[in-house]
Amino acid sequence: MFNRAASAAVRREDKVKPEDMVMCGLFTALIAAGAFIKIPVPVVPFTLQFLFTTLAGLIMGGRLGAVSVGIYAVLGLIGLPVFAEGGGIWYVLKPSFGYILGFIAASFVTGKMAEYYMRDNKTLTVKKLLAANFTGLAIVYLVGITYYYFICNFVINAPIGFAPLMMYCFVLAVPGDIILCFLAAFLTKRMKPIYVKMRGV
């Protein structure tokens, strides 16, 4: 029954309901809060942002998930201190800003993959959710590391080599996010039916 309802939700995704707007606002707030739950890691602080941006896509779908992360990014750029180290348009010059851009893209792709798995009454299993989550994780790090390298070497004149870049921006940071991939999958299995029921489809 849940799979049939989920499939209907995917087909009717273009109809944005008030509940969707509330959920977008909720996830935007969670992403902002996640920025301040920090585990010290050199260069790029480990936060819970990846968990909440991933859940946004998995629960609401790719489009609304990306919207919620995009709103978070806009709020930070206009000056609200919602980023891990403050806010303001100057944040685009911070090497770590690429991860925020990666969150937007990853939320969209992860959500779209989850939608695809739900079509035609396919089962949304933990295994399939993990496939979506690890794809999103790869996108976040690809965008984040590329942006970090470009800003350091060509904008702010703080050259960084490939080896230290990968050490500080990937090797030291990714283990925690891998754990979050599993956590997001299990949470989605429990939260997605509630969201589908809330939307009344």
Image (spheres, rainbow, N blue to C red):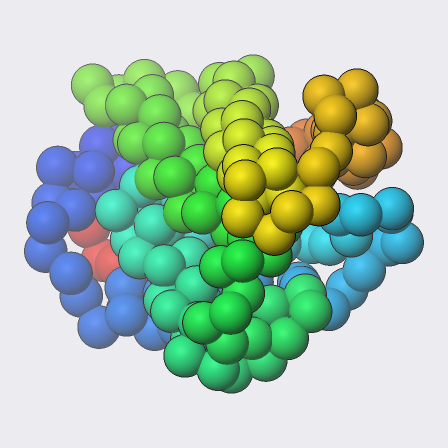
- The structure residue drawn at horizontal position 20% and vertical position 19%, both measured from the top left corner, is 120
192 lies left or right of 64: right
Q: Nearer the viewer, residue 74 or 2?
A: 74
Which of the 4 quarters of the picture holds residue 162?
top right
124 lies left or right of 179: left
Q: Nearer the viewer, residue 68 or 10?
A: 68
Q: Is residue 27 visible?
A: no
- The structure residue drawn at horizontal position 36% and vertical position 32%, both measured from the top left corner, is 109
Percent x, y for residue 115? 29, 31
Which of the 4 quarters of the picture holds residue 153?
top right
Which of the 4 quarters of the picture holds residue 140?
top right
Q: Nearer the viewer, residue 159 or 28?
A: 159
Q: Is residue 194 above or below residue 119?
A: below
Percent x, y for residue 77? 44, 72
11 lies left or right of 18: left
Q: Is residue 128 above or below residue 195?
A: above
Percent x, y for residue 190? 55, 44
Q: Is residue 37 above or below residue 58?
A: below
Q: Nearer the viewer, residue 5 or 41?
A: 41
- The structure residue drawn at horizontal position 18% and vertical position 66%, both measured from the top left corner, is 17
Instruction: Give the quadrant of the N terminus.
Output: top left
Q: Is residue 151 visible?
A: yes
